[in-house]
Amino acid sequence: PRIYSVGFFFGKGPTPSGKVVITGMFSHTMYRLDPGSGALESFAIPVERANPRAVVIDDRGAWWVLLGAPRRIARRDPVLGTWATHDIGMYPHSIGVDPAGRVWFNGHFTRDPEQLGFLDPAMGTVTLRDIPPHPVLAKVAGVLAHEVHGGVFHRDLGADVAVDPLHGGAG
């Protein structure tokens, strides 16, 4: 087997082809690994200091990638291989797609209030939602768990907040 080491990797997959899509954190590159052959393809993100942090693949095969310092979401078209980006106004941490096709993210450094947001790809709009900070853990990074029974959740080291994916409210 081959061992690859290029920054930190966070992956999502397999894709319909059986390959795994991997972020090249601290770079401007995404990777696609064929687990069977060990072949690794690279895909440059056309954003300076892109810093891809997390990736999710939607039901059409598009890659939705959070870009840290640029504070953007990037989408790679599965057919054309082209990239489009959307400014989201915060340094994002984790990503998920809800049943309505909206792309959810949480702020890596948002505190008091903590924030979630979503991009509506059909409208090209970004909506941010404040959620109450955890009374003890508000000083540590959160993680967004997604696609759990069709819902979206913000996790702050064990303190879960459920988000209604159709209306965007915390509950």
Image (cartoon, helix red, strand yellow):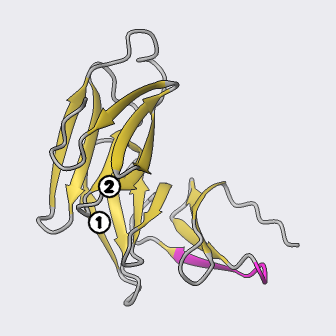
The part of the chain drawn in magenta is 36-43
Residue 82 pos. (x, y %): 36, 82
Residue carrying label 1: 85
Is 14 on the left-hand or right-hand side of 135? right
| Residue type indicated by callout 2 | Arg
Between discs 1 and 2, the one toward the N terminus: 2
Position of residue 75 in the picture relative to residue 31 (left or right): left
The image quadrant where one finds the N terminus is bottom right
* Mark 1: secondary structure: strand
Picture residue at 30% right of the left edge, 41% below the top = 90
Whether residue 95 is visible to the viewer of this picture, yes or no, is yes
At numbered mark 2, what does the secondary structure look like: helix, strand or loop?
strand
Q: Would you name the residue on which mark 2 appears? A: 72
Going by the picture, which residue comes out furthest to the top?
A: 136
Q: Is residue 68 at all visible to an observer of this figure?
A: no
Quadrant (top left, top right, bottom left, bottom right) of the C terminus: top left
Circles 1 and 2, Cβ within 8 Å, touching? The answer is yes
Quarter of the image for residue 110 reads top left
- Residue, x 44% and y 59% (percent of image)? 50
Report the amino acid beneath label 1.
Answer: Thr
Q: Nearer the viewer, residue 100 or 128?
A: 100
Horizontal placement of 13 versus 137: left or right? right
Quadrant of the image occupied by residue 81: bottom left
Find the distance from the CA under tag 1 to the CA under tag 2. Answer: 6 Å
